[in-house]
Amino acid sequence: MHQALIFLPLFAMFLLTFFIGLWLLKLRFKAVKENGLNLGYFLLNKGAKQPDYLAKVTNHYTNLFELPDLFYVVCLILYAGHKSA
């Protein structure tokens, strides 16, 4: 099996994070435009209540930067530590 295949799940996780980030950006614009959320709210994420749909995606995006970091490190260690036969 090719050692470089370890990068496929890394790339998939990167794409997931990227597209959730784009979705979050779209929903933030929607919250400002339709729900009257103050644009300054996003500076410190304080001072107002987010709509539920925005809170869900924000929490999901935040979670994508917690445990998946360990996934990236483990995959890179496995790639670097693999001994070719």
Image (cartoon, rainbow, N blue to C red):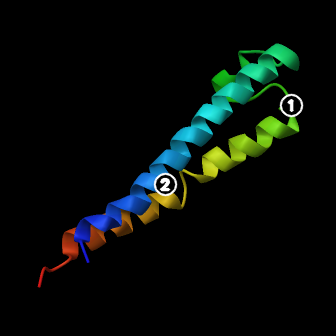
When the figure is inspected, residue 54 is found, relative to residue 8, above or below; the finding is above
Q: Secondary structure at mark 1?
A: loop
Residue 36 seen by the camera: no
* Residue shown at 86% from the left, 39% from the top: 52
Q: Amino acid at mark 2?
A: Met
Q: Which mark is residue 13?
A: 2
User: In the image, is 31 to the left or to the right of 82?
Assistant: right
Q: Secondary structure at mark 2?
A: helix
Residue to which mark 1 is pinned: 49
Q: Amino acid at mark 1?
A: Lys
* Residue shown at 81% from the left, 14% from the top: 33
Mark 2: few, some, or many residues within 10 Å (few <14, many ≥20)? some
User: In the image, is 45 to the left or to the right of 65?
Assistant: right
* Percent x, y of residue 38: 79, 15
Which quadrant of the structure image shows residue 36?
A: top right
* Percent x, y of residue 73: 36, 63
**Quarter that holds the N terminus:** bottom left
Which quadrant of the structure image shows residue 27?
A: top right
* Percent x, y of residue 72: 40, 60
Q: Earlier in the sequence, mark 1 or mark 2?
A: 2
Q: CA distance from mark 1 to mark 2?
A: 30 Å
